[in-house]
Image (tube, helix red, strand yellow):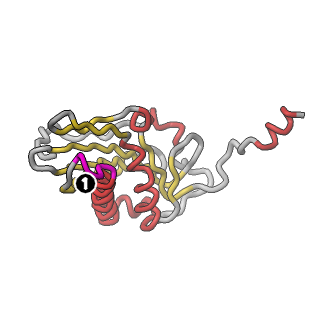
Amino acid sequence: MSITLGLAMAPSAQAADSNDMLVYISPKEFTHSYRLSEYYNRDFWYSQATYVEPLAKEKFGKEFGSVGMCRGLETGKTLVWLKPSMFYNPLMRVFYSRVTANVYASDGQPLATFVSRAEQPGFLGYAPQRNIDTAYSEAMEGLVKMIKADSKVQAALSTPLAAEAPKAPCANIALITPIAAPFALDLQY
């Protein structure tokens, strides 16, 4: 009885609808804590994905239609791999955020890479969660503007896919070739 009930309540293996955009954030960003530190042993530990995931749903959802988070079998027209980063300068009392977005077409071909940066003044010892959230929010708004301005990504989002066309499965994220940028020393955070 319990086995039958468990199978009846299990989610379907096929996704009911495909999304316009899928967002992937590495599981490491959820499980690995990062430390921001200041003088006098004032530290703040946080997980980057807990800030970036809700912002991605909100900001991308407003501009690009249906947005799903990669959890396994989801499919979509485009796949956006977000890589967040944060730095705190205790001398200047500024939070520096950077979010890199690698955008792929439904067949896994790379379309573009975008890097958005933002700064948020604030103290690490007073409301660091709010300052981190604001810095990441500004960086995500910058990404939205860059993605909206890119013709390749807009074409991939606006073109309806045939039923037999591949639809960027999240399960194949490990097989997607990373977008290789030309070597450059990025000293500007």
Q: Position of residue 114 (x, y in %)?
A: 28, 52
* Residue 61 among those drawn in magenta: no
Q: Would residue 41 be found to the left or right of residue 134 on screen?
A: left
Instruction: Give, as a single range, the part of the protein colored magenta.
Output: 124-129
Residue that appears at 20% across and 33% down: 41
Residue that appears at 48% across and 46% down: 107
Q: Is residue 18 above or below residue 2?
A: below
| Quadrant location, the N terminus | top right
Q: Would residue 109 be found to the left or right of residue 184 on screen?
A: right
How crowded is the residue under tag 1: few (<14 C-alpha within 10 Å), some, or many (20+)? Answer: many
| Residue that lies at the very extreme toward the front in this rendered image | 40
Please, what is the three-letter code of the amino acid marked with disc 1?
Ser
Q: Would residue 175 be found to the left or right of residue 14 on screen?
A: left
Q: Which residue, given by chain and number where applicable, does mark 1 sit on? A: 116
Q: Would residue 106 be found to the left or right of residue 39 on screen?
A: right
Q: Position of residue 148 (x, y in %)?
A: 34, 65
Q: Is mark 1 on a helix, strand or loop?
A: strand
